[in-house]
Amino acid sequence: MKILGLSAHYHDSAAALVVDGVPVCAVQEERLSRHKNDAAFPSSAIDWCLDRAGLEPDDLDAVVFYERSMLKFERILTCALRAFPRSWRAFPHAIKNTLGEKAWARGIISSHLGVRGRRIVFTDHHASHAAAAFLTAPTRRAAILTADGVGEWATLTTGHGERRDDGTTDITLQREVRFPHSLGMLYSAFTAYLGFAVNQDEYKVMGLAAYGQPRMVDAVRKVIRRTRDGAFALDLDYFEFQTTASRSYSAKFVDLFGPPRQPYEPIDVRTVEGRRFADCAASVQRVLEDTLVDIARQLRRESGLTDLCFGGGVALNGVANARILAESGFERVFVPSAPGDAGCALGAALYADRIYFRNPDRDVPDHPFWGPAVVPDELAQAARDDGGTVETLDDRALADRVADDLARGRIVGWMEGACEFGPRALGHRSILAAPHARDMRDRLNRDIKNREEFRPFAPVVPAEAADRYFDLPPGGARLGRFMSGVFPVRAEWRSQLAAVTHVDGTARVQVLERAMAPRLHALLEAYGRRSGIPVLLNTSFNVAGEPIVTSAVEGYCTFRRCAIDLLVAAPAIVAKRAAASTREPKGDEAWLSESVAESGAV
Ligand SMILES: [Fe+2]
């Protein structure tokens, strides 16, 4: 059976194709349209998926949309009417937006794809999140937790999933918290208050939180209180997202927390004002974590299950995920590579396959690489057309060559195979660099990523060496598989991993098993032989404001525009010409030169 899953019209649209119960491919629209967080109908993603599988729209048995548009329309309408007359300005916008796209998903899909309406089915938004988390995880029975801003009405659900020996599958979501009470909306309101972009920059709040103290926890608990059934409720006097699209928080919120930060005002955590914002971030982060840990603990107790599958945009919060693993009693916590709405495209397709059509259970490969593959010959061609030179090396020589360059302080663009499904670069579209010196972090922030200095970079480490450098609890390596957990860097290594150690001594580490990305694994080993530490800084291969690169040509164009020294799409390697690539390490990067010199490796 051939099932196409779609997610669209909110943020981060995507398409995914499941054939005979197994994913064939999945890609976010932004990776093809090159428009970051593209929320448009995912025409390019659909075309690519069908092309990849050699299918025509007519070959599809079903097209599954990731939420029930009419229920969403009902929610928007109900909230607008409840808020009237305060909502009168927002009302026409909400109705136009909803009537224009969201409510009529069936007609839009039908007209774009030319498939009959009866072959188009819908899943509940949180069922899509639940399926994306449970059906892609290597577990047969698990509790399920989903949390996001909002879908139709639900904002958080709990339940369980089971893949039975007779091949049937069950996903039951028993409880839900409904809009406007929402952990995602709470976090987004603080994201807006702190001057960041809602639905996009929530991770900046998490990064900033590490610089602050949770001094305002009591104030945050005024705006979100716990309910006797173990859930939570927002005090709506502090918020406006439920009545207008133009502002998330109210004047009463500002009375409580002080003046908001203006988006273009720099954050300097050495100033009183900067510390207030960092404390505010730390406080909402703490309350979010506490609430999730309590809910997960209750779910563990009630379900009696030892595995937890966690989905929804809130599951991108790696600090909260690590606390859930450490404190809720679950032995394993699975977060998919795309827990947000893009991942719902795959979740909806899998949900339809297993639950709606009752097709037999199948294992889903445990990796995030479902997107378009890089073509090394295209890189070679682009470089030659541009007057550059291309080296072609076998795997061993390539690992040695790139490791040498990394050890010399050079920055490497690394493209390999199919691109990742989800927001994180997990070794197929990555910028890699030496992780040792703070200089490197500052250089990347300044010369390539153009981003705030408070934001940390993540490390990647081979699974065999992870415990040596990072303080991983039992189950931590699993969370680290898709960079879903933040864990302490062992104290004795922090000074030598300064570029990837956050101000609070933690890192959002990717724990890499050889089978998932063998070339990157070999590179980490080769780098370890030179530096003594098989760890690299791994950040997404893009510059500020752009999606992660997809094709070899996009990689090459990005490489030419920024301070990346070497570009790799094995077996092809392209180096920057002339002076740009001859930079030698300086400042505290000297640590690496000395250590490399001692090892005699270079
Ligand atoms: Fe969602």
Image (cartoon, rainbow, N blue to C red):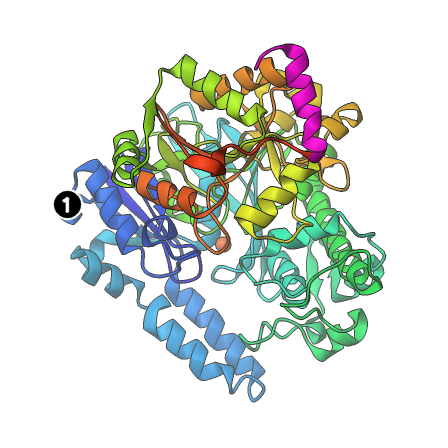
Residue beneath disc 1: 56
Left or right, 295 with respect to 105, comes to: right
Comparing 73 with 94, the one in front is 94
Left or right, 194 with respect to 83, comes to: right
Query: Quick check: is 600 in the magenta stretch?
Result: yes
State the image coordinates of residue 522 (x, y, percent, origin top left): 48, 17
Q: What stretch is highlighted in magenta?
A: 587-602
Question: Is 192 located above or below residue 304 in the figure?
Answer: below
Occupied quadrant, residue 234: bottom right
Comparing 12 with 591, the one in front is 591
State the image coordinates of residue 136 (x, y, percent, origin top left): 44, 33
- Badge 1 amino acid: Glu
Report helix, strand or loop for mark 1. Answer: loop
Left or right, 185 with respect to 52, comes to: right
State the image coordinates of residue 541 (x, y, percent, origin top left): 46, 41
Question: Is 558 located above or below residue 186 in the figure?
Answer: above
**Extreme-top residue of the structure:** 600
Main SS category, magenta section: helix
Where is the N terminus found, in terms of image quarters? top left
State the image coordinates of residue 440 (x, y, percent, origin top left): 63, 37
Question: Is 259 located above or below residue 593 in the figure?
Answer: below
Where is the C terminus found, in terms of image quarters? top right
Figure disc tally: 1
Comparing 198 with 391, the one in front is 391
